[in-house]
Amino acid sequence: MCEQITKNKSGICSKDDLCQYSHNYVEMLYRPSKYKSKFCDKYPHHINECEYGPYCSFAHSVSEISVPLIHTL
């Protein structure tokens, strides 16, 4: 998380979009290190009920997961 956001009461980062850190929880989910690193809470039986569909930051299938799975090692 961006220190300027967490320390400043204004909640404004001077680097704006050029900042390498997240400015809120949603931005954190879409960072490469977090994106599709966990399964959606609708996985595996209710994927069609995910309200975010293809825009969900969580994996909807084994092929989407971005981290190694124990059973595939």
Image (tube, helix red, strand yellow):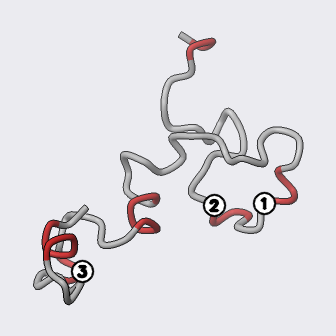
Q: How crowded is mark 2: few (under 14 residues within 10 Å), some or many (20 or more)?
A: some
Q: Position of residue 39 (x, y in %)?
A: 64, 41
Residue 4 horizontal side relative to residue 40, left or right? left
Residue 32 horizontal side relative to residue 52, left or right? left
User: Which residue is at a point 68% across and 33% down the rendered structure image?
Assistant: 62
Q: In this view, does 29 lie above or below 70?
A: below
Contact between labelled residues 2 and 3, with CB atoms less than 8 Å apart:
no
Contact between labelled residues 2 and 1, with CB atoms less than 8 Å apart:
yes
User: Which label belongs to residue 50?
Assistant: 1
Q: In which quarter of the image is the N terminus?
A: bottom left
Q: Name the residue under label 3.
A: 17
User: Which residue is at a point 36% across and 46% down the rendered structure image?
Assistant: 33
* Three-letter amino acid code of the residue under disc 2: Cys
Q: Distance between the residues labelled 1 and 2?
A: 8 Å
Please name which of the two marks, 1 or 3, marks the residue nearer to the observer.
1
Residue 48 horizontal side relative to residue 63, left or right? right
Q: How far apart are marks 3 and 2 (CA)?
A: 22 Å
Mark 1: secondary structure: loop
Q: Name the residue under label 2.
A: 56
